[in-house]
Image (cartoon, rainbow, N blue to C red):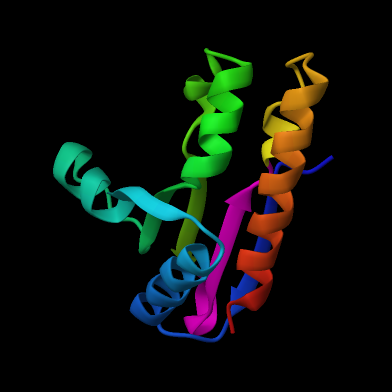
Amino acid sequence: MTYHFSKTVDLPFDAAVAATTAALKNHGFGVLTQIDVKDTLQKKIGAEFRPYLILGACNPKLAYQALSLEDKIGTMLPCNVVVQQRDGGKVEISAVDPVASMAAIENPQLGAVANQVRELLKQVVAEIA
């Protein structure tokens, strides 16, 4: 089982971020956090790194369901979506597979919520042009 869904697109980096954010919104997710890995690594350790942004995405309705079923599930929230620059001007978008990340939790009801989130995130990644 892989732990992510990925797609490479032929968009400028900022356009890929905007398209990803819009696709998340279209499927009921908001972006709670944005971590600019390139900027952070430069500031903290002086390292050069490609454009790499981690979006912390949350679907409030499904997060509420998950939290109601497992009070420690917040350790796995929000769902991370990565937008990163690749060679040749391409950009890769990757979303966590919540089913894979929650496989160790033995709660069938939580598995059902994770499957709903998985399908939505697959749709998000698939619709980015």
Q: Where is residue 124 shown, x and y percent of the image?
A: 61, 66
The quarter of the displayed image where residue 5 is located:
bottom right
Which of the image's four quarters has the C terminus?
bottom right
Q: Which residues are magenta?
A: 86-97
Among all residues in the image, which is located at the extreme left? 43
What residue is shown at x 39% (from left), y 58% (from top)? 52
| Left or right: residue 123 compared with residue 13 | right
Vertical arrangement, residue 89 with respect to residue 47, above or below: below
Q: Nearer the viewer, residue 22 or 15?
A: 22
What residue is shown at x 47% (from left), y 43% (from top)? 60
Which of the image's four quarters has the N terminus?
top right
Tell me how many marks there are. 0
Magenta span contains residue 88: yes
| Left or right: residue 119 compared with residue 44 | right
Vertical arrangement, residue 36 with respect to residue 61, above or below: below
Q: Where is residue 66 shown, x and y percent of the image?
A: 60, 28
Instruction: Kindly tell me whether residue 72 is visible in this rendering.
Output: yes
Magenta span contains residue 21: no
What residue is shown at x 64% (from left), y 56% (from top)? 121
Q: Nearer the viewer, residue 43 or 59?
A: 59
What residue is shown at x 38% (from left), y 75% (from top)? 18
Q: Where is residue 23 shown, x and y percent of the image?
A: 52, 70
Vertical arrangement, residue 126 with respect to residue 98, above or below: below
Instruction: Kindly tell me whether residue 54 is visible in this rendering.
Output: no
Vertical arrangement, residue 129 with respect to residue 76, above or below: below
